[in-house]
Image (cartoon, rainbow, N blue to C red):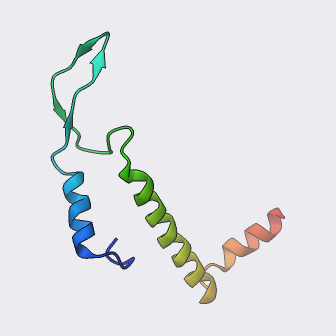
Amino acid sequence: MLKSGLLSEFVSMTKLFFTNVSTRVKVNGLQSFSFNIERGVKQGCPLILYLFFIVVEVLNYMMKEGIDFGRIREMILLIEEIQ
């Protein structure tokens, strides 16, 4: 995210948002004990949509750069074959 030009403060806050997160689940009306989320994110996290958009923008930029410098020639040929 730093390479995409985002402020380091935003990156630090985002890391804090996903660090030391715990949750509980409800099964048959009973809540479980609290447990830590070590990978992934909680369902319905509003920040994930924006992080996804940032990643897609970075990938889009990288692909445009690759096409401009001739590094993604094979992908263009495959797309032309499909059409």
Q: In the displayed image of the protein, which residue is found farthest to the bottom?
A: 69
Quadrant position of the N terminus in the picture = bottom left
Q: Quadrant of residue 68?
A: bottom right
Tell me if residue 4 comes above or below residue 20 in the rendering.
Answer: below
Q: Quadrant of residue 24?
A: top left
Tell me if residue 25 comes above or below residue 42 in the rendering.
Answer: above
Instruction: Say which residue appears at 32% left-offset and 10% top-offset.
Output: 28
Quadrant position of the C terminus in the picture = bottom right
Q: Choose between 23 and 78: the one closer to the eye.
A: 23
**Measured from the top left, where is residue 47 in percent x and y?**
36, 53
Instruction: Say which residue appears at 27% left-offset and 24% top-offset.
Output: 25
Q: What is the tally of numbered marks visible in this picture?
A: 0
**Measured from the top left, where is residue 19 in percent x and y?**
18, 51
Tell me if residue 59 comes above or below residue 52 in the rendering.
Answer: below
On screen, residue 62 versus residue 72, left or right, reads: left
Instruction: Say which residue appears at 59% left-offset and 80% top-offset.
Output: 64
Q: In the displayed image of the protein, which residue is found farthest to the right?
A: 83
**Measured from the top left, where is residue 30 in percent x and y?**
24, 12
**Measured from the top left, where is residue 48 in percent x and y?**
39, 52
Q: In the displayed image of the protein, which residue is found farthest to the top?
A: 28
Q: Choose between 33 and 46: the one closer to the eye.
A: 46
On screen, residue 59 versus residue 17, left or right, reads: right
